Structure formats: structure tokens, C-alpha cells
Image (tube, grey):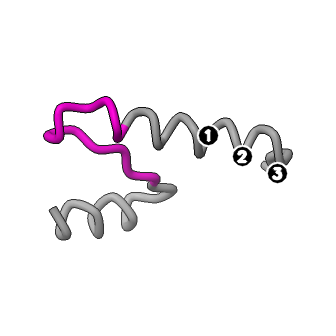
């Protein structure tokens, strides 16, 4: 699925807002597969 530029910008803004307003214990990670999720979990 292809996103338009405006949609991509909205997603990026939402990521920044989420990470800035979180308590520091919760972070947004963009994963598109189970392997991506495992990689993120290893880095934490």
C-alpha cells in the first residue's frame, strides 16, 4: 500500500508526538514484520 506525502507526514508527526509525550518507558517503534519486532526487542 502506497501512502501519499501528506499521510506519511502525519504518521511522522504522530510518532514524534507520542515519543515526546510518553513517560520515557513507552516508545513507538515502526515494525512491518515479526522479524522487525524481534530486532527491536533485542535492542531494548
Q: Is residue 5 left or right of residue 11?
A: right
Question: Is the residue under label 2 in contact with that under label 1 (CB below 8 Å)?
Answer: yes
Q: Residue at x 45, y 55 (%)?
A: 31
Q: Which quadrant holds residue 9?
A: top right
The secondary structure making up most of the magenta span is: loop
Query: Viewer-nearest of labels 3 and 1?
Result: 1
Indicate the quadrant containing the C terminus: top left, top right, bottom left or bottom right.
bottom left
Residue 8: numbered disc: 2
Question: Is the residue under label 2 in contact with that under label 3 (CB below 8 Å)?
Answer: no
Residue 11: numbered disc: 1
Q: Residue at x 80, y 46 (%)?
A: 3
| Crowd tier of the residue under label 1, counting other residues whose Cα lies within 10 Å: few below 14, some 14–19, many 20 or above | few
Question: Is the residue under label 1 in contact with that under label 3 (CB below 8 Å)?
Answer: no
Element class at badge 1: helix
* Magenta span of residues: 19-30
Q: In the image, is residue 14 part of the stretch drawn in magenta?
A: no
Q: Is residue 16 above or below residue 34?
A: above
- Alpha carbon of mark 3 to alpha carbon of mark 2: how far? 10 Å
Pick the front one: 17 or 43: 17
- Alpha carbon of mark 1 to alpha carbon of mark 2: how far? 5 Å
Q: Is residue 23 left or right of residue 35?
A: left
The residue at which mark 3 appears reads as 2
Amino acid at each position: 500500500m502506497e501512502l501519499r506525502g501528506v499521510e506519511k507526514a502525519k504518521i511522522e508527526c504522530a510518532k514524534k508526538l507520542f515519543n515526546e509525550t510518553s513517560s520515557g518507558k513507552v516508545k513507538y517503534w515502526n515494525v512491518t514484520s515479526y522479524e522487525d519486532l524481534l530486532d527491536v526487542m533485542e535492542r531494548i
